[in-house]
Image (cartoon, rainbow, N blue to C red):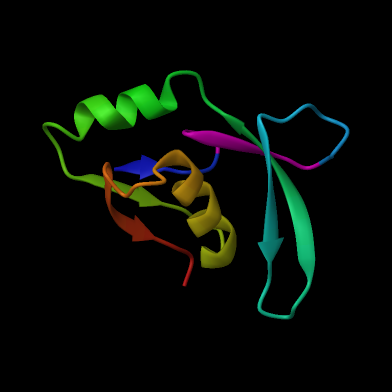
Amino acid sequence: MFDLDETLIHCNESMEVQSDIIIPIIFPTGETIEAGINIRPFCRDLLKEISKYFEIIIFTASHENYASKVIEYLDPDNLYVDHKLYRD
C-alpha cells in the first residue's frame, strides 16, 4: 500500500517550481487548475517490479478527480495498480 502524495509524487503549490508534468484537474464545481507534479525517482520501475509479487493499493487524502489523473499518468495501461482509495 502506498500513499500517493509525498510518497510516490509531490504536487507543487506554485507553478514557478519546475515540474515533471502539468496535469489539468477539473473539479466538480467546473473549476480547472493546472497541477505541477514531480514523480519520485524510479517510481514507475518500483510499481512495475513489485506488481509481479504484490497487489498494489494507492491511497490518498486527496480528491478522486486529482488523484485519478496522477495515478493514470503513473500507470497509463492499468498494469500495476490494483486498487485506488480516495478521500471520499
At 36% from the left edge and 41% from the top edge, which residue is drawn?
2
Q: Position of residue 62 (x, y in %)?
A: 55, 58
Query: Is residue 73 at least partly visible in the picture?
Result: yes
- Does the magenta run of residues contain 9? yes
Q: Residue furthest front?
A: 77
Query: Is residue 61 at least partly visible in the picture?
Result: no
- Does the magenta run of residues contain 57? no
At 48% from the left edge and 65% from the top edge, which residue is drawn?
87
Q: Position of residue 63 (x, y in %)?
A: 56, 64
Q: Residue furthest top?
A: 41
Would residue 10 appear left or right of 15 to someone viewing this image?
left
Q: Position of residue 30 (x, y in %)?
A: 75, 78
At 35% from the left edge and 23% from the top edge, which residue is drawn?
45
Towards the viewer: 11 or 24: 24
In the rendered image, which quarter is residue 66 located in? bottom right
Q: Which residues are magenta?
A: 6-13
Would residue 4 appear left or right of 35 to someone viewing this image?
left
The N terminus, quarter of image: top left
Towards the viewer: 25 or 13: 25
